Image (tube, grey):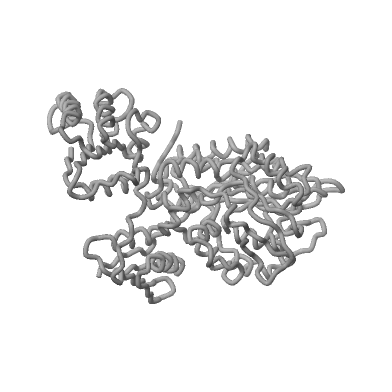
């Protein structure tokens, strides 16, 4: 049984982490440690809402052990994959997901790296089956924003049905939030969910 | 310059009005304090109203309030605006007009003071929009940042609008959508959409000034602003000992994303504390779970809850909607029933 230490974590973090743990393959029951009774009650609402088993023990006034068990029920849906359209699900066994976490390709001269990444994005448009998703994060955000020489090819990919997303935290960090030129914004949940569900991942 | 630092949000264990001490705990603490009687104190903490009111002369009274809390958003400027809109709101809820505002600042020694600058700029912008004058403040070092204001306003004594004097058969108008607490909770869990966060922050930084100004000339019997205790606890305060509040669940304005996140149990601690406070006073069980949570959701800088004569409700609603299009008639005041809050 997985033990999840949520001492000092404010709501709704204990519920989110509990749901993630219950959704992991093979998970059957979990023990969540929290430091206040309100967190116990919020876990109880989640557990009862899904029809899971729920018990708790008060170890001290600021230490509670909460047990949640699936009891044969389906694991919880993962927390909201915000901004990622719900109608397009990338089921395992189909679809390619490309994750681009930098604005160059390979190690070596930066100038060459930039030429290569542009070539790579162009090549994606030429694939017989275009990727289901392309995610941009960290300095990869520079490839989807104004001034990038990759925009036209990314728009071509979009026309072919590829969903293009850039990490919102990264746009904010590089002060690019007003400059997104192609695709939409997502967060780490959106990225992680699609990577986890992908049949093939290319990681640049 | 826009300044965003994750450090702002991560430095706090709970943000916004969700950090409030629960209403039950608070009223226990306040009973038994030594009190000097003063006939000019027209509204004190004896009545859990939004602000204190002190009579100056035959005609006018001062309205005084203070509000501050830890950040609920990462953008320092927006946090400043929300904190100020929230502090100013109590004056509007009393029917008053803010005159002066004093800054209250707690800030970590190790944090970039440029962040504090942005918070103060945001606050000052809202004070200016309110037509009040920023007149000083007090700042201390603290482990977690907090910001707010003490606001003083003025009101014609015969136009004070209390929060617990609603008339039977009045209609209730709520001027902002519910759910900002849930959306901010989802943001903490990195599960909120940017669109939801944008809508919620726009709602929180909006002044209640515009809705409050529309109350003049209408037969308003009671008003409060819906904040950390959530809609139902504020409705309970409004009911007082005299009447019951009927809520129309189908008419409640809320953010769609908040409804969805509530269904995924992205809930605050304060929301559960509010639920506990209402236990036995409102039978919410037959309503959809997500709707229940929206009615318990702590609202940072929430809307006004206005009790207005039934015959004038539609007229006031359409006036308010000119500036606050989400406003809805969400209930009515009824003779006291065995349940203080009913749903119909």
Residue A54 visible from this viewpoint: yes
Task: Give residue B3's position: percent from left, percent from top.
Answer: 43, 36
Residue B125 location (% of width, % of height): 58, 35
In the depicted view, which residue is nearer to us: A40 or B55?
A: A40
Q: Can the viewer see residue B19? A: no
Residue at point 40%, 64% (across, down): A46
Q: The C terminus of chain A appears in which quarter of the rendering?
A: top left
Q: From the viewer's perspective, tell me whether residue B83 is left or right of residue A21.
A: right
The quarter of the picture where residue A48 lies is: bottom left
Q: Quadrant of residue B338?
A: bottom right
In which quadrant of the rendered image does the N terminus of chain A lie? bottom left
Q: Is residue A199 left or right of residue A45?
A: left
What percent of the width, then of the height, locates residue B35? Answer: 73, 65
Q: Residue at x 76, y 64 (%)?
A: B36
The number of discs equals: 0
Side of B66 relative to B143 (left or right): right
Image height of B98 relative to A21, above or below: above
Image point (53%, 63%), residue name: B287
Question: Along the line of sight, which residue is nearer the eye, B74 or A177?
Answer: A177
Relative depth, front residue between A134 and A172: A134
């Amino acid at each position: 049984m997985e033990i999840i230490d949520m001492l000092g974590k404010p709501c709704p973090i204990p519920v989110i982490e509990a749901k993630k743990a219950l959704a992991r393959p093979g998970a059957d029951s979990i023990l969540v440690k929290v430091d206040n009774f309100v967190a116990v009650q919020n876990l109880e609402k989640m557990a009862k809402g899904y029809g899971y088993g729920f018990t708790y023990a008060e170890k001290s006034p600021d230490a509670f052990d909460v047990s949640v068990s699936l009891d044969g029920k389906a694991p919880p849906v993962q927390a909201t994959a915000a901004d990622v359209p719900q109608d397009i699900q990338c089921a395992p066994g189909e679809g390619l997901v490309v994750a681009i976490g930098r604005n160059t390709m390979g190690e070596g001269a930066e100038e060459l790296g930039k030429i290569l990444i542009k070539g790579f994005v162009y090549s994606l448009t030429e694939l017989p089956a275009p990727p289901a998703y392309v995610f941009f994060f960290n300095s990869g955000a520079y490839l989807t924003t104004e001034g990038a020489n990759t925009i036209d090819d990314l728009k071509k990919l979009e026309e072919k049905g590829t969903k293009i997303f850039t990490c919102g935290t990264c746009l904010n960090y590089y002060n690019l939030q007003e400059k997104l030129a192609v695709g939409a914004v997502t967060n780490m949940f959106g990225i992680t969910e699609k990577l986890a569900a992908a049949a093939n991942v290319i990681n640049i | 310059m826009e300044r965003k630092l994750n450090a702002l949000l991560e430095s706090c264990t709970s943000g916004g009005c969700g950090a409030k001490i629960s209403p039950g705990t608070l009223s226990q603490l306040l009973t038994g304090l030594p009190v000097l009687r003063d006939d000019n104190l027209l509204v004190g903490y004896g009545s859990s109203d939004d602000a204190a009111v002190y009579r100056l002369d035959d005609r006018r009274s001062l309205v005084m309030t203070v509000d501050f809390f830890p950040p609920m958003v990462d953008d320092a400027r927006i946090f400043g605006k929300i904190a100020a809109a929230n502090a100013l709101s109590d004056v509007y809820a009393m029917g008053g007009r803010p005159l002066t505002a004093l800054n209250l600042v707690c800030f970590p020694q190790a944090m970039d003071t440029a962040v504090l600058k942005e918070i103060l700029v945001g606050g000052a912008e809202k004070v200016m929009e309110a037509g009040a004058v920023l007149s000083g403040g007090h700042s201390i070092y603290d482990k977690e940042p907090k910001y707010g204001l003490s606001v003083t306003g003025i009101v014609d004594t015969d136009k004070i609008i209390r929060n617990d004097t609603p008339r039977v058969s009045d209609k209730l108008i709520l001027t902002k959508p519910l759910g900002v607490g849930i959306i901010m909770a989802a943001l903490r869990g990195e599960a909120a959409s940017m669109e939801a966060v944008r809508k919620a922050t726009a709602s929180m930084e909006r002044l209640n000034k515009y809705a409050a100004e529309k109350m003049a000339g209408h037969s308003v019997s009671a008003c409060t602003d819906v904040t950390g205790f959530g809609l139902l606890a504020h409705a309970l305060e409004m009911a007082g000992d005299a009447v019951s509040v009927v809520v129309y669940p189908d008419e409640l304005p809320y953010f769609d994303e908040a409804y969805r996140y509530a269904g995924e149990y992205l809930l605050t601690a304060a929301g559960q504390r509010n639920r506990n406070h209402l236990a036995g006073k409102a039978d919410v069980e037959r309503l959809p779970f997500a709707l229940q949570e929206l009615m318990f959701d702590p609202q940072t800088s929430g809307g006004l809850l206005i009790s207005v004569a039934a015959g004038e409700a539609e007229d006031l609603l359409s006036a308010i909607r000119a500036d606050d299009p989400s406003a809805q008639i969400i209930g009515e005041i009824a003779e006291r029933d065995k349940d203080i809050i009913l749903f119909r």
